[in-house]
Image (tube, rainbow, N blue to C red):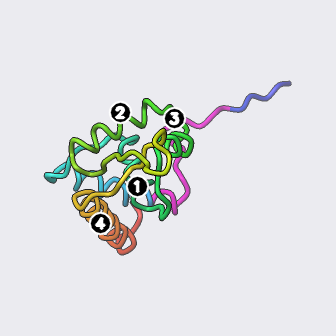
Amino acid sequence: MTTTTTKPSPATVSPAPEAQDLLRTLRGTIIEQVASEAPDLSMRQLGVLLEVYLQDDAQTVRGLAATLNVSKPAITRALDRLGELDLARRKVDPSDRRSVLVQRTLAGTKHVHQLAEQLAKHHAKVARSPAP
């Protein structure tokens, strides 16, 4: 006699409660971002932006590519968009002209602070509400 095990359907699998809370926080923040005048950023662009603003060390295109595990051209495209939006800018490293440094901007700092405030607000809202 053989027994077969059935896999649960995707609809019945749910993340751990802590992960659900994080997902609800992220969902609320994304909905607020989409409804706002804030620029739409891809996940890669957002990853680059957060790496630049949350790390104390100067970031380079090469270093960002290694950290995010993507190619240097992918980082360049993300930085092109962030530059168009004045959220970050590139500068040749004066100590090594082959290297490109990524600099923060006032607009980028404001954007990251706004995102952090939205995340905190939605995190508090999720913490106060019962899980669905």
Which residue is at 51% across, 37% downward?
10
Which residue is at 13% across, 52% downward?
37
Number of numbered discs: 4
Number of other residues with Cα within 10 Å of mark 3, as a class: few under 14, some 14 to 19, many 20 or more:
few
Q: CA distance from mark 4 to mark 1?
A: 11 Å
For marks 3 and 2, the one nearer the N-term is 3
The residue that label 2 is drawn on is 77
The residue that label 4 is drawn on is 113
Residue 86 circle label: none
For marks 3 and 4, the one nearer the N-term is 3
Please say if the residues under marks 4 and 1 sit with CB atoms less than 8 Å apart. no
For marks 1 and 3, the one nearer the N-term is 1
Q: Which residues are magenta?
A: 6-20
The answer to whether residue 54 is left or right of residue 30 is: right
Q: Furthest-right residue in view?
A: 1
Residue in the foreground of this view, choosing between 86 and 43: 86
Residue 70 circle label: 3
**72 in relation to 94, above or below:** above
For marks 4 and 2, the one nearer the N-term is 2
The residue that label 1 is drawn on is 50
Tag 3's secondary structure? loop
